[in-house]
Amino acid sequence: MLRCLKNMFCSAVFLLFALSLCAAAPGENSFSEEQLSAITLKALKILHNYHYRQLEFTPKVAQDHYEMYIKALDGGKFFFTQEDIRSFARPAQELFAALLKGDNTLAFKIYERYLVRHGEYKKFAGELLKTKLDFSKDEEYTPDRTKLPRCKDDAELKKLWEQRIKNDVLFYRLLDRAMNDSKDPEDRKALDDAKRWNAGTPESKVLKRLRDVGNAVKKREKIDILGIYLNALAHVYGPHSNYMAPRNAKDFDINMSLSLTGIGATLTTDNGFIKIVSLVPGGPAAKDGRLKVNDRIVAVTQENGASVDVIDMPVDEAVQYIRGKENSKVTLTVLPGDKGRNAAPVRITLTRAKILLRDSEAKGEILKINGKKIGVISLPSFYMDFEGAIRGDADFKRCSEDVRKLLVKFNQEGVASLVMDLRRNGGGSLAEAINLTGLFIPTGPVVQRRDSRRRVSLAVDDNPLVVWEKPVVVMISKFSASAAEIFSAALQDCDRAVVVGDSRSFGKGTVLQVEKLKDGISIFGGPRRDNGSMTFEIEMFYRISGSSVQQLGIRSDVKIPSITEEMKAGEMFLDNHLPWDNIDPVNRNRFVPDLKQKIAVLQKKSAARIAASPEFKLLGKRIAAYRGLRKKNSVSLNEKTRWKDYLQEKAAADAEEKEMGLSEEAKKEKLDPAAKEAAAIALDLYELINK
């Protein structure tokens, strides 16, 4: 039963969290070629037979797999040249035949070339750094090469390597200068700590980093390399499909319990940096508030003073330094994501803690606007204590029950209208999304599901009890995903709520299933061993209106400006995402008469408030600055120019901070401007309904 409950867990962000904290342990598992081949065939069988996409397995799929593997190893186009790619190339039919036999020879051959390139780069850097680098030339370096062609040959590749090394050295030179030049007392206080991390010359730091990264790449065992290869195969079917090697699969099981000790952040790589994808609600980083999505971690310092540079380090290696014992401290050196490529580093010290289910529970607050009480409930995930449910605990932890208690309290205190804040809600339990919807409607349809055989089923709220009958506003962002989208869509489709916030939600409309590959694999008749696991899209869910949530997400009725609106986030940006489509709608009740006309009034009132708001004017400046920084694809390798760019961006940031300081009361308030505007919309809706 536990597996069935877990299969209903449909969170995009949750899966990212699990995958971001995985690390292979060299030497932990040793696999023969026959065993690796068996794992490959089992993974292929699962994807081919059970994935929702139902791809006909053809030579084209094998070709796509090969290209995805190249991208997984060298997505930044920094190691393989066009000549390398031509040497790897095989006819699609040959790739197809090899995969059908479980032949992984090409995967290991390509990885061997990857190792050679790493070694060549390290040697090249060592020789270049013995010379005096010239930072007076007007050169540009483009860190993000995903849209650029690969280097044609070794000569062009070495020119790129030279630019990369110069950029790395210049980064450390300017980092020292920025820290020493700062007049900020906190920066000065942190300078001694920073020097521990910055010990040595910029050149020596670059070499040490290359040595550490190279060692990590060389330590990978064949099962870890196969993991990258099979993960690439899974991504051909869908962006949320993954193969997890044995150690990675264990970490996934740990994360399913939500009791991992760390800082509570989802991490990925971004052109050599460790970038924050999301923060786990209730985790140390989210509670602290200083670490933000899109921030880039460049170094990790332990409580005992040991520091490590994590630039160019694989995520699975970096998280080993970020993890640690409960109540121990870790200091992150971070480049703020909203300050662009020339951002000055900041130091953030966090106390590690276990991330427990209760830390992510729903929280409520009551505002008073024009004499009326408006309730705001922040729900970070659709959580549910699976183990407690299986044990039959009467009071097992679940979000629908926590929200119910808050709604009862709001009713008792005379709250007139409600805001459900799902902006940071990455999903969770599908059952809880249905149960939560039931608190706002009598019995009725909530969501449709279609499996890989295209059979449609309907999930219905069968509890006639309605806890909240008053107006509802649902806040979303581009990070609201999966179960959060089911709940929002259900209330929107039956005219029960007005959806506000970013123009759309994330757009993840699939349900995931996890299969252990040890099922059915018995080595030499002995006990079955852990061969990792496969996660894949098993179903797609649809709104009761018939429209898919996939790719396009939920559209807001009233838009509220935000930084997240400007971010390139969502299912539509993921490789091989499943496309939007629709099925037949189902009959449903309509709860608020003439809601479309009311929404038009809400839009006008909200736009007028936003235009007159000093906070939103300041936010507008931040958004404009963010757009400008996002357009800059390259950085200067001229030290004077680079320093000038840094000073200009810093001056703009300081001016923003100074302007923000004019409104200290606003800074002390718990709710941000967007949440307060959502509350104002909730009051407008109440007044329109109760005219």
Image (cartoon, rainbow, N blue to C red):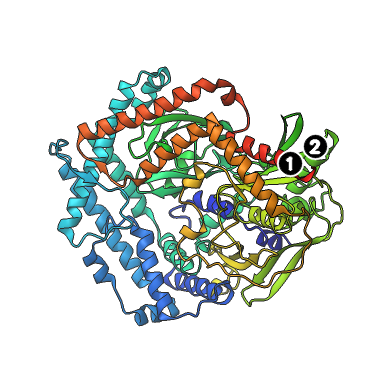
| Kind of residue at disc 2 | Phe
Is disc 1 placed on a helix, strand or loop?
strand
Instruction: Please state, as top left, top right, bottom left or bottom right, where the C terminus lies in the image.
Output: top right
Q: Is residue 171 above or below residue 63?
A: above
- Viewer-nearest of discs 2 and 1: 1
Residue indicated by mark 2: 410
Instruction: Please state, as top left, top right, bottom left or bottom right, where the N terminus lies in the image.
Output: bottom right
Q: Is residue 97 above or below residue 79?
A: below
Q: Is residue 108 visible?
A: yes
Front-lying residue, 148 or 415 = 415
Q: Which residue is pictured at 43% across the width and 59% down the height?
A: 224
Q: Which residue is pictured at 64% across the width and 49% down the height?
A: 600
Q: Looking at the picture, how far across and down is residue 346, in whole percent? A: 41, 30
Q: Looking at the picture, how far across and down is residue 613, in whole percent? A: 55, 31
Instruction: Measure how far apart labels 2 and 1 are at the Cα level.
Output: 9 Å
Is disc 2 placed on a helix, strand or loop?
helix
Crowding at mark 2 (Cα within 10 Å: few <14, some 14-19, many 20+): many
The answer to which of marks 2 and 1 sits earlier in the sequence is: 2
Q: Which residue is pictured at 21% across the width and 46% down the height?
A: 163
Q: Is residue 388 left or right of residue 293?
A: right
Front-lying residue, 56 or 304 = 56
Asked if labels 1 and 2 touch by Cβ distance under 8 angstroms, the answer is yes
Q: Which residue is pictured at 24% across the width and 71% down the height?
A: 87
Crowding at mark 1 (Cα within 10 Å: few <14, some 14-19, many 20+): many
Mark number, residue 418: 1
Q: Looking at the picture, how far across and down is residue 668, in whole percent? A: 60, 24
Front-lying residue, 94 or 558 = 558
Q: Is residue 297 visible?
A: no
| Kind of residue at disc 1 | Leu
